[in-house]
Amino acid sequence: MNRLLAGLILLFSLSASLKAQEGRGLSGLWAICYGRSSFSAKAVFIDEEKDSFIPFAWLFYVLQYNNKWILIDCGFRNQEYVRLFKISWRDPLELLAELSLKPEQIDLVIITHAHFDHAGCVSLFPQVQIVITRKAYQDAINRAQSLAEKKFLQEAGRFIIFSGEYRIEPELRIEEISGHAPGSAVVYLEKSLIIFSGDEAYLKANWTQLRSNGTVFDVRANQAFLKRLNKEADKYLILSMHDPDLVPAAQHILKLR
């Protein structure tokens, strides 16, 4: 009887352990394409000589990781930018709703840098914690367009602010590059072999052809990262925020994992 009881206890413990492990790590990854437009080739490639426009997507990513919902960047709603860049646009929150996600369910937003299309919706998530580099955080405050936005950015306890490198989990690492913008960062999912390039690389050609961004804060930092990315391309899945080929034209949401 004691052996039977001990066996049942062991079986129960193993079952509980396996269930706990099921919730660990990456269990879902989606690319959200909330807009499409054309974009200046000179803005994408620093060495571009032609004054032409190329296809451009506006993306962010949703991760289900360790039973938490995490966004990498979050899109924007400002209709002035929609008109300025002539974007075929969908509301990012409506697209999240298509994944049955409400704003209050989002646990964490990683902001790769402070530009409007990466941080524009961040104040719409009431429960969220925000991870951002110190330089990008200061850049966001400098760019704030209203007192309400600045107040949100200065709200104590909401932000995880770092310099250099920060690990949310053992395999989820954010690294500051500061090539594209002040404090601009990239995100590594090391165990899953995924890199989110932020805007250090707009398109695949930036790293495959080692063509630096046309919109750049520190060209040397950007070039150094693109060289690393070029070497890592065979090992990692590299996901940028503006690749028009990533999500099929008729779709707005693509499940990647």
Image: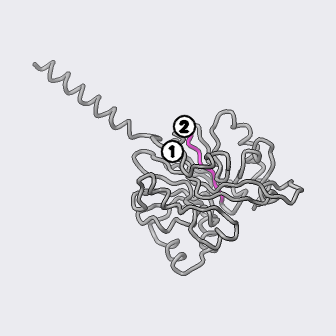
Which residue is at a point 71% across and 52% down the rendered structure image?
202
| Residue, disc 1 | 29
Q: Amino acid at mark 2?
A: Ser
Residue that protrudes farthest toward the right in the picture: 49
Q: Which residue is mark 2?
A: 192
- Does 78 appear above or below 146? above
Say if mark 2 contacts mark 1, CB within 8 Å: yes
Q: Inspect the magenta stretch and tell me whether residue 162 lies in it.
A: no
Residue closer to the observer: 83 or 184: 83
Circle 2 — which element? loop
- Relative horizontal placement of residue 234, taking residue 256 as reference (left or right): right
Q: Looking at this rendering, what residue extends furthest in the left direction?
A: 1
Dot 2: within a 10 Å radius of its alpha carbon, few (fewer than 14), some, or many (20 or more) residues? Answer: some
Q: CA distance from mark 2 to mark 1?
A: 11 Å
Among numbered discs 2 and 1, the one appearing first in the sequence: 1
Q: Secondary structure at mark 1?
A: strand
Frontmost residue, 40 versus 241:
40
Q: Quadrant of the N terminus?
A: top left
* Up-down relation of residue 122 to residue 239 (above or below): below
In x, y percent, where is residue 215? Answer: 76, 61
**Residue 185 among magenta residues:** yes
Determine crowd level at label 1: few under 14, some 14-19, many 20+ residues with C-alpha closer than 10 A: some
Main SS class of the magenta portion in the image: strand
Amino acid at circle 1? Leu
Front residue (pair 65, 156):
65
Give the quarter of the image for residue 178.
bottom right
User: Which region shows up in magenta?
Assistant: 184-191
Q: Which corner quadrant of the image does residue 59 belong to?
A: bottom right
Q: Residue at x 54, y 37 (%)?
A: 192
